[in-house]
Image (spheres, helix red, strand yellow):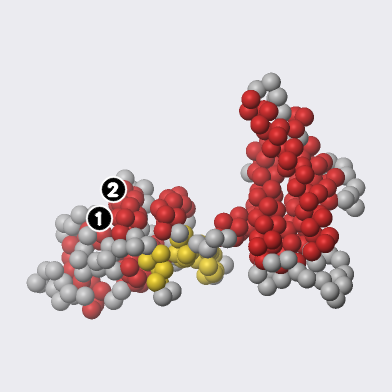
Amino acid sequence: MLNGTQEGKLIISDLSKRDILDLLRVGLYELEFQYFGKYSEITFLNRIINLDELPSSDSRFSNMKQDIRQHTINNDDWDIDWVFEDERLNLTNDNDLFVKFINNIFHPLVRDEVSEWKNYLNKINEILKFDKMKLKVTKEFSGRPVYEIVAITNGGWIEDYTEELKVKFSSDYIDSQVSIMLENIESNPNVAIGKAKELMESCAKTILDELGSEYDRKMEFSPLLKLVMKELGLTANTQEKEQESGKIAAKILGNLNAIPQSMAELRNIFGDGHGKAKTFVSLPPRYARLAVGTSTTIVYFLWETYQDKHSVF
């Protein structure tokens, strides 16, 4: 079966299904992760399919629910991974049921928060990426994230980065900036470009504040970014140039220093920070994606460097 989407439906490849089920099988046998979480197998499976309507493989019982209870609770004579091979569920061939099965594993009602669920979610995403899909937060349930398998668009990595930045900064203001930036890439590229520059500025000020560094709050954007890079030891002059790796790092960081100036110029001309003449023509969305992608990448790099050097978490 080919992977991808057909008429809006997610189609996971047979190879990916096999690898995901093998991963879950290992979790069961190594007593590391139970796909049914805090529920029993019967309760979990009833979330995705009506077990009362499926036949029993044991002539003594009238439906699959009774069958499962007899052979996993009363007698416990089925293999621990029976669910992955059961022909009535047919997980490997029923694509819709497979998607529901995986989605429910990580639902807040099901998952055991003290288990290895995040580790297994990440491992499953490593498999799904080959089908251009991933388990992603799509909504909340009682304040807790709900993960569902979704298709990854070409710009999906930008959304991933920005969602993670929200978590890293834990700031309502930055959350708002990120959300506005993403929402406006297609419809209002100039707004997205402006917010991309503001995100970098907010990141720089946050890091400088955390470091206790003194700086002018009204400092221009480019000097501000250069200052935070200096404080983090990310200048070309701080690299060990006698080593080849140091020379390469110096070149990269030298080029990195030029980006803030270009971002500032782009924002001044096409962003939302200044009044525009009636003849103003906005840039196409691809330029907004470039600005947002550049901004989130640099912010992620700066923040992770700060965390690494100062072990704040």
At 75% from the left and 29% from the top, the residue drawn is 238
- In the picture, which quadrant includes the N terminus? bottom left
SS under mark 2: helix
The residue under label 1 is 81
User: Dividing the picture into quarters, in which one does residue 255 lie?
Assistant: top right
Query: Marks 1 and 2, how far apart in space?
Result: 8 Å
SS under mark 1: loop
Q: Position of residue 113 (x, y in %)?
A: 47, 56
Residue 191 visible in the displayed image: no
Residue 65 visible in the displayed image: yes
| Amino acid residing under circle 2 | Tyr
Number of residues whose C-alpha sits closer than 10 Å to that of mark 1, classed few (under 14), some (14–19) or many (20 or more): some
Name the side, left or right, on which 108 lies relative to 234. Answer: left
| Amino acid residing under circle 1 | Asp
Q: In the rendered structure, are the residues bearing label 1 and label 2 in contact, judged by CB atoms less than 8 Å apart?
A: yes
User: Dividing the picture into quarters, in which one does residue 241 lie?
Assistant: top right
